[in-house]
Image (spheres, rainbow, N blue to C red):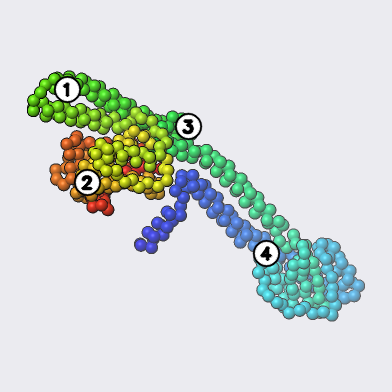
Amino acid sequence: MGAAMAESFTLKRLLPRALFGRALIIIVAPVIILQAIIAYVFFERDLDTTTRRLARDVSADIALLVAVEDTYTGAQRLKLRALAARQLDYRVSFIPGQDLPPLHGKLTSTIDVALDDILEQRIGNRDFRTARSGNDFEIRVDVHDGVLRVLVPRDRVTVSKPDIFILWMVGSSLLLMGIAILFLRNQVRPIERLARAADAFGKGRAVPDFKPYGATEVRRAAQAFLTMRARIERHVTQRTEMLAGVSHDLKTPLTRLKLALAMMDGEDVVSMRGDVTEMEHMLDEYLAFARGEGGEEAGITELGELVRDAAAACARARQRDAIPVAAPGPVAVSVRRAGLRRALTNLIDNALKHGSQVAVSLAPRGPWIEIAVEDNGKGIPADRREEAFRPFHRLDEGRNLQAGGSGLGLAIARDIARAHGGDILLGDSALGGLKATLRLPV
């Protein structure tokens, strides 16, 4: 059972992954198998049978010539030999006083084997030899006073031009497969375009020129994709507009409260001002989480520069030393710049809150670009890391990722990363704390 599973796994690895390659195998494999069966039947069955029938006729003619040589003498023998050669269309000659040389080697071709077998049956125990001589077959037979030499035309012994049959068979198959591949290519192309459009939309990139075309089923799938995309975009727009209205309505009384508190004095007023400021900050985060930066268009951005800017801004805001950023040469990717900057800011700011040492690195990893933010804080237990991404949720023990905040920092960052077709993963840092890795598709 293990061997069968291993063979199945090996076969799956050898098969092409693309739809066009697999469909091509479905077309080509039966044609090749059919051609192999036809070739086997033709060469091993029909060709062999036909060759033996022709060889039987030639052997009968040779037996007749041998009988003439053994029965008649003198002028009558010469006359009958010439008559037989003329009627049979053979070239017949007689070599007097000569014996056949010993036989060397083995016969291999179907024609030689068939001719020798049937000749042996026809002429008894006489010595004979068969050989190729240009476009003819040479047959030499021992008679009582010498060697009879007969040159038989090739088309009298074998099927004429079997290579033409092969040429027609292979040529017609190649022509039909070429036509099939051309039509298959046209049928697969709409599916490939649909896959590229879905992939681009999943990465947050615009697909303005996509239109359904192709077979009915492909058109239906493409139309369903367009409907889904419109529904998602409409949902994001409605959510953004709703939260923008709520934000505007709530900020108006907050602004009045700030103006009223600015004209008041006292210890209680200071705490109230702090509460109003925190409410404004939380309101901005709620709006950013609901919007998900969905209204921004994607554009080509140099990630190294963006990461360094975000790290420098966070260090200045926290009045901390410059954060080291390890980045290779220029890495240009199509992203929503403002949204990705916000995600990086949230990750770096969380690291600065809970660690005295923070490091940021950027590196390509196969089909991904990974931006890692590490710190030397307390970290998060492995079984609670996914819980840290829940909106409005704060961990009760260990590391509190949003101390004094709304509990939306990591939720917003992951939402932005997934809108780009990527994700955020949490792990252990080499510095001793938490490592947050933001992955983006290339």
Q: Earlier in the sequence, mark 3 or mark 1?
A: 3
Q: Earlier in the sequence, mark 1 or mark 4?
A: 4
Residue at 85%, 77% in the rendered image: 96
Callout 3–callout 4 Cβ contact below 8 Å: no
Q: Which mark is nearer the camera, 1 or 4?
A: 1
Q: Please give the residue where the numbered disc 1 appears in the rendered image.
A: 258
Q: Which mark is nearer the camera, 3 or 1?
A: 1
Residue at 46%, 44% in the rendered image: 19
What secondary structure is marked by label 4? Answer: helix
- Whether residue 211 is visible to the viewer of this picture, yes or no, is no
Mark 3 to mark 4 CA distance (whole Å)? 59 Å
Q: Please give the residue where the numbered disc 2 appears in the rendered image.
A: 355
What secondary structure is marked by label 3? Answer: loop
Tell me the crowding category of disc 2: few under 14, some 14 to 19, or many 20 or more residues within 10 angstroms, Cα based.
Answer: some
Please name the amino acid that badge 1 sits on: Lys
- Does residue 283 lie above or below 151 as drawn? above
**Whole-percent x, y for residue 21 in the image:** 49, 47
Q: Earlier in the sequence, mark 2 or mark 1?
A: 1
Q: Earlier in the sequence, mark 2 or mark 3?
A: 3
Callout 3–callout 1 Cβ contact below 8 Å: no
Q: Please give the residue where the numbered disc 3 appears in the rendered image.
A: 213
Q: Please give the residue where the numbered disc 4 appears in the rendered image.
A: 52
Outermost residue on the left side: it is 267
Callout 2–callout 1 Cβ contact below 8 Å: no
Closest to the observer, 76 or 112: 112
Please name the amino acid that badge 3 sits on: Tyr
